[in-house]
Every structure is written in C-alpha cells, then in structure tokens.
Image: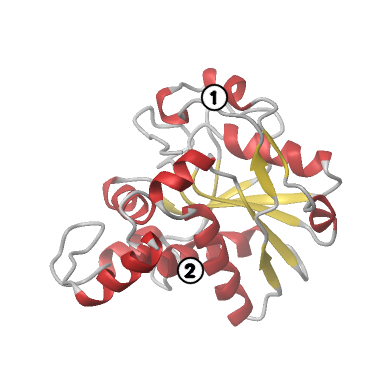
C-alpha cells in the first residue's frame, strides 16, 4: 500500500530534482549523466576498495559517488522516489554490460535487512535490479533479476562500521533463499547493488552464491568511490 501511494503522489505532485534540487523535474539531465548509463556519461570503470577484501569479485561502477549521486540513491531508497528506479536501473545495466557475460545473465541483488525493507516500504536494490534487467533485455541481452539471497540473521547497520568491522558483521549472514539455490546454477551471476564502499557486502554475497553452486562472473553497482582510494566519508545506508 505504501509503495502504491508513493507511485501516485510522484505522478500528481510537483517534484524537484533528487540530485541537485532543480525545480519541477524528478531528475535533471546533469544528474542523470552523473549517475551514469547515459551516452554522454563518464565511462563505466572498474572500482576497488582499499583495502580490498579477499574474495571480492571484479566490480564495475556506472557513476562516481558524490553529493548528487548520493542524493539520488537516497531519494530512491529512503524517501520512496520510486520513479528513480528506471534511471538508476539504466546506470546499473551499463555497469553489468562491462562485466562481459556472454549469453544469459542473472542479476542477483545484495540482500537488505528485512527490517530496513519494511521501514522503507520497498526493496530498493531489488527494484533497480529489475529495472536493469529490463534495460538489458531491451538491448538484446537475456537478463533476469533474481532475489536469490537473504540475510539469515540480524546484522548491525553497516554505515556505522569501518572497513575492519563490516566483514565480521556480515560473516555467515547471507545465504541462498529457500528454494532459490537451483536458480543460481542456471547462468552466470552478476551481483548488483546501489553503492560499493568497503566491498564487504559484495564479498559475502559472492561467497553465498558460490556455496549454493553458482558462478559469480562479477559485480555491478550504480556508484563507486571517486578514485582507487576508498573515501572515508562514503556511507552505506543498508
């Protein structure tokens, strides 16, 4: 019900750009370029956190984590600006293409905590994964978004933890959802998320896919750090 109301209000009420605040547009052209995926955007690039956790698959980012990009991601995730799922999905699809999977690809979102999904009224990462899969199919790539992972125990808010604490917080916390393990074996998996900071979430998710018998070809995110050094002010809202 909450998601339905968010969709309706987004259609009938005037909005400002989620990134820069420009009036009467949900996402201006400049901010659309910044999040990536548009023809004139900065090319998708491989990103690495510092330190890089063992087992992290190759990660590609469509945009650079900055003020406007952060604002767009948070508007979709935390404020229910559901119309942003499509441009975020377009950006994510561009990053998935760089992973270079031939043929069918499974987009598997990093799972969010159930309490976070309930509080927000929607699963933001799963939503943009579905949007990315649709964008890829429009471009001729047989893609399917599968929410095949779940958190099997409560974890602390990752945004309050540093690079050392995040892997310990997530260790053993992610597994294949009941009945979904077989899906992970039918095609190469690309893990997807909105942001990457320390890489802990993607590393744990990759281990869960491997444990279920799947093959992780890489990972794709909407935004990563500005440069190879992980910015200490980058924050995850998971």
Left or right side of 78 for 95:
right
Q: Which mark is residue 215?
A: none
Left or right side of 28 for 65:
right
Residue under the image location 67 percent in, 59 percent down: 146
Would you identify the image quadrant in which residue 122 lies?
A: bottom left
Left or right side of 191 for 207:
right
Callout 2 secondary element: helix
Query: Whole-percent x and y of residue 26?
Result: 25, 68
Residue under the image location 81 percent in, 50 percent down: 181
Callout 1 secondary element: helix
Task: Please give the count of numbered marks on the rendered protein.
Answer: 2
Residue under the image location 25 percent in, 59 percent down: 18
Which residue position is annotated with label 1?
166
Which residue position is annotated with label 2?
90
Left or right side of 57 for 103:
right
Above or below: residue 189 compared with residue 145 = above
Q: Which label's residue is closer to the chain start, 1 or 2?
A: 2
Q: Nearer the viewer, mark 1 or mark 2?
A: 1
Residue under the image location 18 percent in, 72 percent down: 13
Q: Residues within 10 Å of mark 2 (few under 14, many from 20)?
A: many
Q: Gap in Å between the C-alphas at discs 1 and 2?
A: 29 Å
Q: Nearer the viewer, residue 82 or 207?
A: 82
Query: Whole-percent x and y of residue 81?
Result: 32, 61
């Amino acid at each position: 019900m909450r998601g339905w109301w968010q969709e309706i209000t987004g259609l009938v009420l005037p909005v400002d750009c989620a990134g820069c605040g420009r009036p009467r547009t949900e996402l201006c052209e400049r901010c659309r370029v910044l999040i990536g995926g548009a023809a004139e955007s900065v090319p998708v690039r491989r990103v690495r956190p510092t330190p890089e956790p063992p087992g992290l698959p190759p990660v590609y980012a469509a945009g650079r984590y900055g003020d406007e990009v952060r604002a767009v991601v948070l508007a979709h995730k935390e404020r229910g600006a559901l119309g942003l799922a499509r441009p975020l999905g377009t950006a994510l699809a561009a990053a998935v293409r760089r992973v270079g999977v031939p043929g069918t690809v499974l987009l598997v979102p990093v799972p969010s905590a159930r309490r976070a999904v309930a509080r927000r009224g929607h699963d933001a990462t799963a939503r943009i994964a579905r949007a990315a899969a649709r964008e890829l199919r429009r471009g001729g790539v047989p893609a399917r978004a599968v929410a095949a992972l779940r958190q099997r125990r409560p974890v602390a808010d990752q945004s309050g933890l540093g690079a050392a604490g995040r892997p310990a917080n997530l260790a053993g916390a992610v597994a294949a959802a009941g009945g979904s393990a077989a899906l992970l074996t039918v095609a190469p998996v690309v893990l997807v998320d909105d942001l990457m900071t320390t890489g802990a979430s993607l590393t744990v998710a990759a281990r869960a896919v491997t444990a279920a018998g799947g093959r992780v070809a890489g990972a794709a995110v909407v935004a990563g750090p500005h440069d190879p050094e992980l910015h200490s002010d980058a924050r995850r809202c998971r």
